[in-house]
Amino acid sequence: MTRPEVLRAIKGIKPEVEKLASRGKQCTFFEATTCMAFQHFSRRKVDAAVVEVGMGGRLDSTNVLEPVLSIITNISLEHTQHLGDTMEKIAYEKAGIIKPGIPTVSAVTETEASEVVEAKAREMSSELYRVADGCDIRIHDIGLLNSSISAITKYNKYNNIKIKLGGEHQTGNAATSIVAAEILSRKTFPIKPENIARGLESTRWGARLQVVRLRPTVILDATHNPGGAETLSKFLRKHFSKKPPILVIAMLVDKDVGGVVKLLEPLVSQIIVTESKYERRMKAESLAEKISGETEIADSVAMAIDRALELAGTSETVLISGSIFTAADALEHLDELRMREAMEILSELHGTGAYPGRDPETPGPPPGSQEPFRVLISTILSQRTKDENTHLATEALFAVFDTPEKLAHARPEEVEELIRPAGFYRQKSRNIINTAKVLCERFDSLVPDNLETLVELPGVGRKTANCVLAYGFGTPAIAVDTHVHRISNLMGLVRTAHPDDTEECLSRIVPRELWLDVNRLLVRHGQTICAPVRPKCNKCPISHLCDRGIYG
């Protein structure tokens, strides 16, 4: 969800939350955000929504839905203070999502828990599909970054699937996904086997053994209970037995901290203890007391990461773990560090970077009396065309019409001929002539220097307006064109479909003093190395900071 969508959802549920409060009934944060999510799904008219319970299942707020399929993953002892202190009790709560006549997929392996799930399925007349019976997984390789598997089901064969998720346990999750997808393809949605395989290969899950960067390697994992810590410990023994990582850890006060620490402490070289920003955080000093060996204490996750990176140099590994809130704080800081390092490297590589409407090999001039106008027009011309075509069109146009007054009185057919290399020349001719007329009539032939007014001009959106602010006036702004949008997503800094959303996300990640660098350096990088087709990842100096470079 974008920020405006979140705000809209909050506005939508606020009256209902206040109505409950007036009756003395408290709506929890999870309940409120669940309602927001359901409203969002409805507005977006999604074909299918994968909804995960918050805790347990039987009494969970997500359990009001009527699903087309229920999935129960493997069960471990967690949330015992709420769900019960035995596998059977926890399985009973988990099995509460089984609905009458609705098929259920079960990946439960423990005998007592499995019997509870099977009994509930019989009671509900739910057709039960056991993952262990329905999908045979063959593991070819388990690597630090990904795994290679093949799978055989009753209906299909899946050969050499590359799962870009760390940990052997993800092969079991892949089997569950395959079984579930095949059931849906037969009962509800026509999903082709090749699309199931492609979906597995394109799946990413942040903060789950996520390698955020290399040199040094930084791994982020939201482990917060002994079950997750056992999975993490297996991963560490396999990949880091000879060179244990430095651990940054922050946990919540209501978790089995001792159980987690007991499993992880023997497998790391140093421990830096800290605390997240979340209200239920455990104080760093209290967490340090749970650890038998020596620790360092840092006041914040960001400070702990800085210290760990200092100790790690370029050859060691840093592991950050303890909770999803620890992971959130860590990603916020790591993304800023990645962006700072990337901008520094690209500045050395590309110099002044790109400049709208000018030769990619030469820097643009400093802002002058007509520079905002040139940036404005050249950026309008750049829409839906290649950079070199924009340059040709801009040079030809400004050789004849280099002021708003001249362009406002130009004949459309003459302008069309000059800007023909930019494509869509009739529409663009109308836009730039009308823009010039508006500048002359409303702004005394001067280009406005604020975003709100700029986007009112013909053919001007946020990207064009931000280019004018950044290049024409030197005002800090993040101009998101196709290069910036594409590279930001490839790096994993954002997960967005629309450039406006990319701008909003980058404005929170990138320090303000670097805003002017983002467009000029990422555009030049996109022109020379990180091309839309066949990017030169093997020659990229920031590949160690990039999801595409790390995971391929």
Image (spheres, helix red, strand yellow):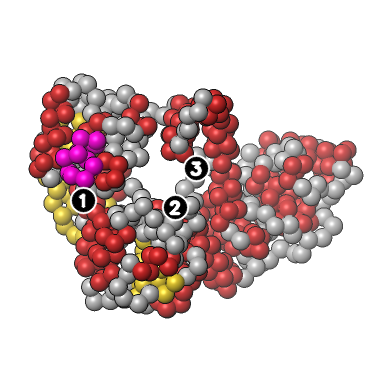
**Amino acid type indicated by mark 1:** Thr
Numbered mark located on residue 443 in the image? none
On screen, 264 above or below 256? Answer: below
Magenta residue span: 84-94
Where is mark 1, residue-wise? 171
Residue 447 visible from this viewpoint:
yes
Q: Position of residue 249 (x, y in %)?
A: 38, 64
Tell me the quarter of the picture where residue 424 sits. top right
Say whether residue 156 is left or right of residue 420.
left
Q: Residue at x 65, y 68 (%)?
A: 352
Seen from this angle, which residue lies furthest front? 24
Q: Is residue 207 magenta?
A: no
Q: What kind of element bears circle 1?
A: helix
Residue sitting nearer the eye, 332 or 545: 332
Where is mark 2, residue-wise? 280
Q: Residue at x 20, y 21 (%)?
A: 101
Q: Position of residue 287 (x, y in %)?
A: 38, 65
Say whether residue 246 is left or right of residue 301.
left
